[in-house]
Image (cartoon, rainbow, N blue to C red):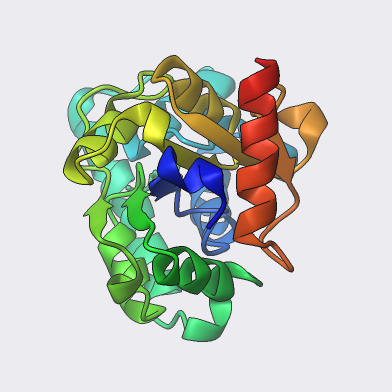
């Protein structure tokens, strides 16, 4: 590992849209719900739900449709959406892990890096199991771990604490504006996954993990840390 590995020892990954493309399944289930309620919900609108919990997402959809529900109705519909989603992920296969993720995780672990998965999804374990990813992470925190929603950095702070590292010793990998902001507020290094124009708060933005080398990531983050 490069010199920076003396400083960076932890790698914290979001799940949906970073490790696996479960965002498409969430969209299908939310869309079905929106259709039932007569709320217009085009694909680009789904970006606004990234990083939000199940209940926060439902509340957004209700807000967009100008709809009101009692707490009991919200719990019912959140459950309905979750059953649809679980039906979609039940048959996920290891081949659905996004390109380059496994070689990158192998490289990190072979270099002595510690890995954490931090997801706002309460279904994170089910996804890891069906894609056979459980053993790639030293620590897994799902949507039941943090009480405060992003951009509060609690979920990432808990991950760093579980790895017994300081935030400045960790890189967070996230594809969502709120996640990147949370990592920045928490004092982490941040690699955004997606397009640079969508993630201005990230130190480095990559399109995905295809051909992604650990040494390149560490070098770029080191440069940004020096500049910043
Ligand atoms: C929840 C939301 C999803 C998504 C994830 C975070 O997942 O329902 O739309 O925002 O959090 O990636 P879940 O319902 O699985 O807890």
Above or below 201: residue 98: below
Return the residue nearer the eye: 168 or 126.
168
In this rendering, position of residue 174 left or right of residue 138: right
In this rendering, position of residue 34 left or right of residue 222: left
Where residue 31 sits in the image (x, y, percent)? 57, 49
Above or below 17: residue 63: above
Above or below 203: residue 31: below
Where residue 59 sits in the image (x, y, percent)? 41, 25
Residue placed furthest toward the front: 3
Q: Residue at x 45, y 23 (%)?
A: 182
Q: Residue at x 57, y 51 (%)?
A: 2
Return the residue nearer the eye: 26 or 78.
26
Where residue 124 sits in the image (x, y, percent)? 32, 58
Q: Residue at x 60, y 39 (%)?
A: 191
In which image quadrant can residue 176 be found? Answer: top right
* Quarter containing the C terminus: top right
Where residue 225 sits in the image (x, y, percent)? 61, 24
Judge whether residue 6 can be spotted in this image. Answer: yes
Q: Residue at x 38, y 72 (%)?
A: 87
Above or below 94: residue 64: above
In this rendering, position of residue 11 left or right of residue 190: left
Return the residue nearer the eye: 4 or 171.
4
């Amino acid at each position: 590992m490069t010199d920076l590995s003396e400083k960076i020892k932890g790698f914290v990954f979001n799940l949906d849209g970073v490790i696996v493309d479960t965002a498409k399944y969430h969209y299908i289930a939310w869309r079905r719900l929106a259709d039932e309620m007569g709320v217009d919900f085009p694909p680009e609108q789904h970006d606004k739900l990234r990083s939000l919990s199940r209940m926060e997402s439902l509340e957004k959809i209700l807000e967009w449709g100008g709809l009101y529900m009692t707490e009991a109705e919200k719990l019912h519909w959140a459950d309905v959406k979750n059953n649809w989603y679980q039906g979609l992920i039940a048959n996920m296969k290891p081949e659905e892990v996004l390109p380059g993720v496994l070689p990158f995780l192998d490289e990190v672990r072979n270099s002595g890096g510690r890995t954490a998965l931090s997801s706002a999804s309460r279904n994170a374990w089910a996804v890891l199991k069906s894609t056979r990813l459980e053993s790639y992470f030293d620590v897994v925190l799902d949507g039941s771990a943090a009480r405060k929603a992003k951009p509060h950095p609690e979920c990432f702070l808990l991950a760093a604490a579980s790895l017994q590292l300081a935030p400045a010793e960790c890189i967070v990998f996230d594809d969502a504006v709120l996640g990147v902001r949370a990592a920045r507020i928490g004092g982490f290094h941040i690699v955004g996954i997606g397009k640079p124009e969508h993630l201005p708060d990230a130190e480095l933005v990559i399109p995905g993990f295809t051909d992604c080398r650990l040494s390149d990531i560490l070098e770029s983050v080191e440069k940004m840390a020096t500049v910043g």
